[in-house]
Amino acid sequence: MFARILLIVLLITYAPGASAATNQFIISQSVTNVDTTAPTIPTALSAVGVSVNQINLTWSASSDAYGVTGYQIYRDNVFIATSTGTSYSDTGLLESTSYTYNVTAFDASLNISALSASAIGTTFSSVEEGDGIDGGAAVPRLVEFQVIADYYSAELTWITSYPTRSIVRWGLTPEYEIASLSESSYRSDHATQLTNLTPNTKYYFVILAQNGVGTEFVLLQESFVTKERIDLQGPPNVRNLKGNIDSELVRSLTWENPDVSDFSYVRIVRKQTGFPSDASDGELVYEGDEERFVDSATQGMPGPFYYAVFAYDTQGNSSSGAVVKIVDPGYIEPPKEISPFASTTIFRFQDLVFIQDEKEISYIGEEVFIEGTDPFLIKIPYGKLPEHLKTILVTIRFATDDSLTFSFLLRINKDKTAYEATIDALETEGKYPIDIAVFDYKERTITDVSGYLIVMMLKSMGAEISFGFWKSLSAKAAQLNYFPWILIFFLLLIISWLLSRRKKENIDARD
């Protein structure tokens, strides 16, 4: 009580700029709302020796009008620890020794209950024979076991017949050569997580248990196989990513999530020193499945700010990342003459590989013909670029409005064979300018190449065309308005075929 009165006096004395009337009001509020009732006394305290150096405590929960915050544990009338739950393992004790325990409960206002009734626990003796009931030197039994294997991890849970200290070893062979994990205390319920595993791989493991006097027993020797990860391809990037800023310097992003069945969520990271290269490069600012984000944390702060949006599928694969730069009103880009990057040429536009429906698409000059209803893959073979650090930025401008753009990164694939990105269906016919910029941070160079995507909606018209040449020819004719000439060409072919057939019929009739 004295501490609470002192706190109120300090509030009165040091309240900045407060009048006498205000101070009187604070006193009235503090006295009215202060919690002075302690929680109820913990009951049913139990102290059970489980090894030569550990005693486990359990008790029944206390109650409080405002909620119990935690419990204080006393051993032989000396405070030793606090716990937020109703159990505690006291370790590092002497063997064959009895200890007396008490517990108190406290709330958020630091009201503390009276001591609970005492409970006495005794540690085991290292020479104890054990009777199989209280542990001691008894042989532990495995009561229950479960393993849940994922792609890159596995969770093992098990229950022993009495508290034991378990050790898990695992590996690719029965030698368990990879690693081991040991529990720090004795308990009956056990769990551990094995990480950094490989999909579709068999792992061997052994679970050992130490009884109360430190004797080790083999509980289980088994194996499991991690899940086979069939889908290693990331989902398409989000489409139409746009950055906006208002007069109050509030920045926001809008986009369209990939239209694929296994899409799960997007992750957005932010930087001020260039585009994030992956989902961990920068500050994580959003995760979810919405299509709009307001970055209120940067309100009023000077920019520019760089954002990358990564789409994830249900198996944890991510897209290469769509990117956008949001600049402040009136921001002026530095003159290109002082750019630290010098222009160079290390690859051509035709070095890019475009794949759709699992088929590589042919070029016509610097134009690539894409079906507008399907996603497609863009990649640069790994050997086309130097191995050191680089950023590959691809920008596609809308066919209907050249001032609108969306950009994304090419990221090295898991096989380290190419830098690639999957792009969602563009869905609008037209000619899309596409630019690729490679920033080489070692050589301080930049390579720019450009070309065009010609987007057609053939499938939506029921014209499924699989042969690439005719697909490209049709698109080229549409683009250059050659349809009259193509029509004449086909009419001449038909007339020629009819004439040759009639001539053959006349020859057959004379014969």
Image: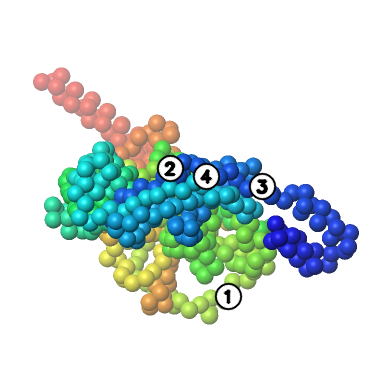
Q: Nearer the viewer, residue 372 or 244?
A: 244
Q: Nearer the viewer, residue 9 or 236?
A: 9
Q: Is residue 168 left or right of residue 442?
A: left
Give the labeled residue for mark 2.
263
User: What separation in Å lies between label 2 and label 4 (alpha carbons)?
Assistant: 50 Å
User: What separation in Å lies between label 2 and label 3 (alpha carbons)?
Assistant: 52 Å
Q: Nearer the viewer, mark 2 or mark 4?
A: 4
> Residue 334: which numbered mark, if any?
1
Please name the amino acid that badge 4 sits on.
Pro
Give the labeled residue for mark 4.
42
| Mark 4 neighbour class, 10 Å CA radius: few under 14, some 14 to 19, many 20 or more | many
User: What separation in Å lies between label 1 and label 4 (alpha carbons)?
Assistant: 69 Å
Residue 104 visible (yes or no): yes
Q: Secondary structure at mark 3?
A: loop
Picture coordinates of residue 131, whole percent (x, y): 21, 43
- Sequence-wise, which precedes: disc 1 or disc 3? 3
- Residue found 29% across the figure and 56% down from its top: 96
User: What separation in Å lies between label 3 and label 4 (alpha carbons)?
Assistant: 15 Å
User: What separation in Å lies between label 1 and label 3 (alpha carbons)?
Assistant: 66 Å
How many marks are shown on the rendered structure?
4
- Sequence-wise, which precedes: disc 2 or disc 3? 3
Q: Nearer the viewer, residue 421 or 277?
A: 277
- Residue found 52% across the figure and 44% down from its top: 42
Give the labeled residue for mark 3.
37
